[in-house]
Image: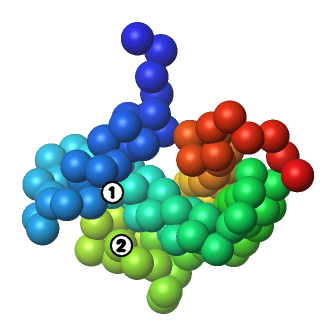
C-alpha cells in the first residue's frame, strides 16, 4: 500500500497506547513511539475543540510549537534516542520531526473531524 510511517503510527495508535510495555527493536519502533506520543498530545488538544476549524488551529499550533530533541534536557525519550553527534545531525532530526508533527496534525484533523468543513 501507500501507507507511510505517519499512517502506520495513526493506524496502530489505539493498540499501541494500550501496551504497558513496548518492545523497541529498531529505528522504526523508536519513530513509532515518538509519533504515537505526539498523536496523543494532538488528540488531547482536540478534546477542547468544538469543530474542525478549532481542531485545525489547535493542531497547527501544537505542530509548530517548540519541541525538545535528543540531547535537550527536556527531551521525553532520552533513553530511547541518543543525542546527535553533530549540529547538522541535530538540525536534520529537528527538520524531519517538524515534518512528521505537521503531517500527524493534518491527518488527525481529517480523521477526527471527518465530514466537517473548517469554520
- The reply to whether discs 2 and 1 touch (Cβ–Cβ < 8 Å) is yes
Quadrant for residue 66, please give it: bottom right
> Residue at (19%, 60%) from the top-left corner?
18
25 or 16: nearer the viewer: 16
Task: Say what secondary structure mark 2 lies in.
Answer: loop
Please determine whether, in this image, residue 36 is positioned above or below residue 103.
below
Q: Residue furthest top?
A: 1
Residue 91 visible (yes or no): no
Quarter of the image with the N terminus in it: top left
Q: Residue furthest right?
A: 119
Q: Colour scheme in the image?
A: rainbow
> Residue at (68%, 34%) from the top-left corner?
115
Residue 104 position within the rendered picture, expressed as x and y whole percent measured from the top left: 57, 47
Residue 106 visible (yes or no): yes
Residue 98 position within the rendered picture, expressed as x and y whole percent measured from the top left: 65, 54
Around disc 1, counting alpha carbons within 10 Å, would you say few (fewer than 14), some (14 to 19), or many (20 or more)?
Answer: many
- The residues bearing labels 2 and 1 have C-alpha atoms spaced at a distance of 9 Å
**Left or right position of 79 against 60:** left
**Left or right position of 110 against 68:** right
**Which residue position is annotated with label 1?**
33
Nearer the N terminus, badge 2 or badge 1?
1
- Please give the count of numbered marks on the rendered protein: 2
Residue 41 position within the rendered picture, expressed as x and y whole percent measured from the top left: 51, 69
Residue 35 position within the rendered picture, expressed as x and y whole percent measured from the top left: 44, 54
Please determine whether, in this image, residue 77 is positioned above or below residue 53.
below
62 or 29: nearer the viewer: 62
**Left or right position of 32 against 99:** left
> Residue at (81%, 40%) from the top-left corner?
117
> Residue at (36%, 67%) from the top-left corner?
82
Q: Nearer the viewer, mark 2 or mark 1?
A: 1
**Which residue position is annotated with label 2?**
77
Amino acid at each position: 500500500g501507500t501507507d507511510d510511517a505517519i499512517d502506520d503510527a495513526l493506524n496502530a495508535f489505539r493498540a499501541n497506547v494500550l501496551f504497558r510495555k513496548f518492545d523497541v527493536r529498531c529505528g522504526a519502533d523508536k519513530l513509532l513511539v515518538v509519533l504515537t506520543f505526539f498523536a496523543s498530545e494532538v488528540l488531547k488538544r482536540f478534546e477542547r475543540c468544538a469543530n474542525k476549524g478549532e481542531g485545525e488551529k489547535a493542531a497547527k499550533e501544537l505542530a509548530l510549537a517548540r519541541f525538545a530533541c535528543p540531547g535537550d534536557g527536556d527531551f521525553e525519550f532520552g533513553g530511547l534516542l541518543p543525542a546527535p553527534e553533530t549540529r547538522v545531525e541535530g538540525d536534520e532530526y529537528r527538520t524531519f520531526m517538524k515534518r512528521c508533527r505537521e503531517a500527524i496534525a493534518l491527518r488527525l484533523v481529517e480523521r477526527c473531524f471527518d465530514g466537517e468543513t473548517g469554520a
